[in-house]
Image: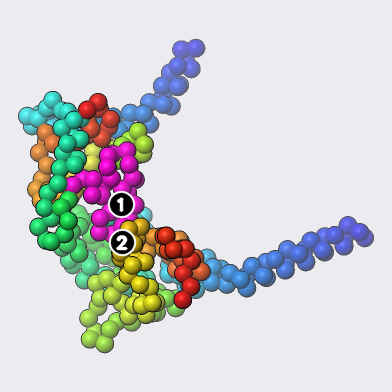
Amino acid sequence: MRRWALLLTALAGPAAASAGTAVEGLQAAYRSEGAGPFSASRGAAAWQRQAPAGNGEAPRSCATCHGADPRSAGRHARTGKPIEPLAPAVSPARLSDPETIEKWFRRNCEWTWGRACTPQEKGDFLTYITGGSP
Amino acid sequence: MKRNLMIIGSLGVALTAAIAGTLVNADDWSERLGRGGSGVGAVADARYRALCGECHMAYQPGLLPAASWQRVMDGLGDHFGDDAQLAPADADAVRDYLTANAADRVAGPRSRGFAQVAGSGAAPLRVTETRYFLGKHHEVPVRLARENPEVRSFANCPACHQRAEAGAYNEDEVRIPGVGRWDD
């Protein structure tokens, strides 16, 4: 009986933990930089916050490419390529690799807001995207 | 005897079906056999697909001549308005793959088309600026492509070419979102 429980944990463990582990690790790093606690409602508000594009194009927010919320599918504003939902609850492979998460924060904060996101903002986004209650 | 006839009969049916399939789908078959046909060679490099296929389709290297890929790789800091710089080792590997398999380095009628550069000799930066692409798409109105919310850009090949990711650009397989088949 106990063996079965162990086996089930082993099978379910890594898949269930992938997004969680990466996000927890990054949020711990952000805390060590002075950020936190993290809030899903701040993340949700920031998701919609628009910034002027500065080149005559329409103002940009996360929602421009990722859709109304992290559970929705999106579309790249310029190329039209479909974008899978960011929420691991919908797309289990999402947020499973800390380097990939940091890479896209780097690129997309710059593209959307014209600056890097702060550790606080990144932590809030991760809490919001992983479905923390707003 | 009856059994033999049945076997011969079924062989005949199978053979006829195979021949008919080949005739109908000649393009498709030559694509699968890697002879170019209606397509270009599919992307075979996993690193390139992963690094360059996130914001847009990982364009097959046979869609642009080597000189164009060199220009693209030289300008990743301002990649059509976006910063798409790669780590040096990744950039080198991607550059090698793209140039080694560029339109002017591989066989196939489509790649021969894409290998032709404009008279000025300047290598185009975009597939959509090649003479070959323009010749194939000049009848497609912008409202069906750039102004179509499901397409947005002529560079969004898979929006209409159902098997673009596999390098297949057969006109029969075009489905324009909101419109359907394309028949020029």
Residue at the limit of the structure toward the left, as seen here: A34
Residue A125, percent from left and from top: 19, 36
Circles 2 and 1 in contact, beta carbons < 8 Å:
yes
Residue B34 seen in the current view: no
Mark 2 — residue?
B152
Residue B151, percent from left and from top: 34, 60
Q: Amino acid at mark 2?
A: Arg
Segment tinted magenta in the rendering: A61-85
- B177 and A83: which is toward the camera: B177
Residue at the limit of the structure toward the top, as seen here: A1
Residue positioned 52% across, 65% down in the render: B32
In the image, is residue A69 part of the stretch drawn in magenta? Answer: yes
Residue B72 seen in the current view: yes
Residue B135, percent from left and from top: 37, 80
- Magenta stretch: helix, strand or loop mostly: loop
Residue positioned 33% across, 35% down in the render: A88
Mark 1 — residue?
A75
The image quadrant of residue B46 is bottom left
Pointer 1 chain:
A
Q: Amino acid at mark 1?
A: Arg
Residue positioned 76% across, 64% down in the render: B13
Residue at the limit of the structure toward the right, as seen here: B1
Secondary structure state at the residue bearing disc 1: strand
Q: Is residue B163 left or right of residue B13?
A: left
Residue positioned 38% across, 31% down in the render: A15
In the image, is residue B158 part of the stretch drawn in magenta? Answer: no
